[in-house]
Image (cartoon, grey):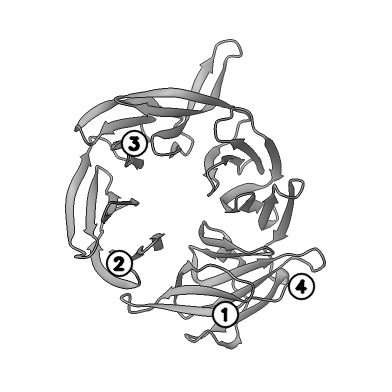
Amino acid sequence: MGILYDHEEWAVYAEGKQLLIWREGTLVNEWTVQGIQDYQFYTAEDELVIIGNWGQGLTRLRIKEGTEELSEESALRTSFHIAQFQILPSSGVILAYDKVAGVLHLFNSREERYQGFIKAHPAQTSFSSHGPSEFQVFVRDFDPASLVIKTYLNRYRLRGSNASLINTIPMEGLFIKRWVVRSACGAFFAVISTSECEQACQLKFFLQDASIPFHTETLEGHAVSAAFVSPLKLFLILRLAQGNALCLLNLESSHTHQLLSLEAEFIRSSHEIDEAGNFTQPSSVPAITHLDSNLKLVNSSSNSIFFVMNSAPNILFCWSFTKNIDSHLDTWAFPAKVVSLGELNSATVAAVCLTENPTSLSKIEISQPFSGP
């Protein structure tokens, strides 16, 4: 599974049935996680808190800074299967989604009581946090005037024991899948609406408190994964009828987008890297099917995007693009799984690898490919 959390001095990696917990580059503890489906991480005062979802409930793990002592306790038990969850640490509210019933339940963990529920759209990725005390949920409602079931993205704010509706955004089109991608700067977000059957993808960009998008883009193909690589650049992987493609939508330059088909002819170079960061030999071109999965890591410089895929954890891809040189890919096969990417500079790329002995990390630096001015 690779890296799950990397913030300030803390880092958490999944290796098999173990969570490896690191602080300032040193392994401080391990946690057996058999049966855990997904996680949430946050820091509170002098400790790292890990919430694990095992289906019928949530488990809370606390790791004290300094002593690195580990304590485990039950955070929530339910009578339904938790398909998705989110904890809002500032309020102590737990959002737990029952996908079978299409219901988002709200629990107050501090007062240990049930707070209510919201009927969510069962076919969409249900909700996402929107600040310390707000969250967004896709809902649907029957419109008697048009006799059509319509989809909305609602935003709620928690006030005491109540969740108040503060914004609603109508969603257009009969898209099968929708989800929200938030810019790292927090000023705006994008709603990705996509349908594999229709081979269509719609992107709508909103300011944080707006109900009307400031930009809408329609693309050919089904969006598999998306991430902001800078405040105004959205990176997507599209599944097209003729194969897969990379797409970069740049809101800084007249809302233009660049597209690169994921075919072997666009891979300019492939190399194997040793533990010292040396190019040992040219490697075979990685199978294009490696890219048909979710993004694991992504980072960018002014004219390149670096990314790693879940299905090819030891291969670093670089998509380079400039005005006067054709867009292309370079790849590097590292000796171990790439679990994080350091800050990029004009000369080098730093990749942190988890070795075969999962108690040690290695930082490997390689030269960036020359892409021209």
User: For mark 1, what is the residue?
Assistant: 366
User: For mark 4, what is the residue?
Assistant: 372
- Where disc 2 sits, the SS reads strand
Label 3 CA crowd tier, 10 Å (few <14, some 14–19, many 20+): many
Q: Residue 134 carries which label?
A: none
User: For mark 3, what is the residue?
Assistant: 95
Asked if residue 276 is positioned above or below residue 39 in the image, the reply reads below
Does any portion of residue 1 appear in the rendered image?
no
Residue 95, picture quadrant: top left
- Measure how far apart labels 1 and 2 are at the Cα level: 26 Å
- Where disc 1 sits, the SS reads strand
Q: Earlier in the sequence, mark 4 or mark 1?
A: 1
Taking the image as shown, residue 8 lies to the left or right of residue 211, namely left
The structure residue drawn at horizontal position 27% and vertical position 48%, both measured from the top left corner, is: 54
Label 2 CA crowd tier, 10 Å (few <14, some 14–19, many 20+): many
Disc 4 + disc 2, Cβ < 8 Å: no
| Disc number lying in front (1 or 2) | 1
Q: Which amino acid does label 1 sit on?
A: Ile
